[in-house]
Amino acid sequence: MIAMNLQREGFPAHFPKAPGPSGGASPFEALPEITLKKGQVIFREGSSSSQYIYLVTRGLVMISSFHDGKEVLEDYYQEGELFNIEILFGQNRRELTAEAMTQLSAIKKIPLSNFRWAIKTNPGLLEEVMSNLSCSLSRTQERLRRFALLSSTERVVNFLISHVQRSGKRVGLEWVVKPALTHQKMGLIAGTGRQTVTTVLNKLRRAGIVHFNRNYLIVRDLEALKKMSAFE
DNA sequence: ACATTAACACCAC
DNA sequence: GTGGTGTTAATGT
C-alpha cells in the first residue's frame, strides 16, 4: 500500500507491496487486526504515552489535540501507514489523541519492543519508517501551504483534489472514495467548519463535478476541480 | 466581500 | 435517539 501511494506521488518505492486490502507491513502479518468504529479512541490525551506503534490496515486514523476547547488536527494516516513512530526516538507527546476517522477503520497494534526487534531482523523496515515520516512531512507541508495561500472554499477544493488522488480508486474517468469522510472531518483537515464543506460540496454537485452521499464520494471531473485551485 | 457560528428541519441508521 | 446533512439568518472581520 505504501509503495503504491509513494509511487503515485513520485517517491521511490522502498517496500514491497503489502498483499491485499487488509494486508500489513510484512513483519507484522501475524498480529491481530483491530477493527474500530468511527470516532473510537485508540489513545487519549492525558493518558500515559502509548508504548505501541500502530499500522493502519483500513480506513483513516487521525491525531488531534485540544486548545481551549478547540480540536486541532495534527495529522492523519491512511491504509498502510504507521503512526506513533515518534516513540522510536523517545518523543512522547502526551497531549495527543488518536481516533478512527471513518467507519470500517482497522489497525494493528505493535509493541515497541517487537518493532525494535523487527528493525534489527528486517532493515527494510527502517526505510519504511523513514518513508512514513517523509509522507507525514509532505502532507503537513501541503496543509500549511493551503492555509497560507487559499481561502476556506479553496482549501476544501484543494483538499478534495489531493485526497481523491491519494485515497480514491480510479473507475473509468471518475474517482471513487470509500468510505467517505464526514463533512465535519473534512472541515477539520481543510481548516473550516462543516457548513462550509457542505455548501462547497453541494455547489460542486450542482455543477456535476462530484457526486456523494454518506457512504462514498465520486469525483466526476478531476480536471475541473484542478482548474478551480491555485495549485494541486 | 468573505467567513464563521448558531439555529432548525430533515433524514438515515 | 443519535449523528450527519442542507439551508438560512445573524454576526464578525
Image (cartoon, coloured by chain):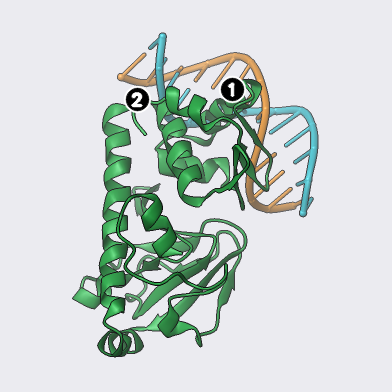
Chain colours: A green, B cyan, C orange
Q: Name the amino acid type tagged 1.
A: Lys
Q: Name the amino acid type tagged 2.
A: Ala
Residue positioned 44% across, 80% down in the render: A26
Residue positioned 55% across, 59% down in the render: A39
Q: Label 2: chain?
A: A
Depth order, front residue of C13/A22: A22
Numbered disc 2: secondary structure:
loop
Residue positioned 65% across, 21% down in the render: A206
Residue occupied by mark 1? A203
Position of residue A214 measured from the top left corner of the image (x, y, whole percent): 68, 44
Residue positioned 30% across, 85% down in the render: A122
Image: A176 above or below A55? above
Q: Is residue A147 left or right of residue A59?
A: left
Residue occupied by mark 2? A230
Task: Classify residue A150 by image quadrant.
Answer: top left
Quarter of the image for the C terminus of chain A: give it: top left
CB under 8 Å between discs 1 and 2: no
Q: Which mark is residue A186?
A: none
Q: Residues within 10 Å of mark 1 (few under 14, many from 20)?
A: few
Q: Earlier in the sequence, mark 1 or mark 2?
A: 1
Q: Is residue A64 visible?
A: no
Position of residue A93 measured from the top left corner of the image (x, y, whole percent): 27, 66
Position of residue A147 measured from the top left corner of the image (x, y, whole percent): 31, 34
Depth order, front residue of A62/A157: A157
Image: A39 above or below A113? above
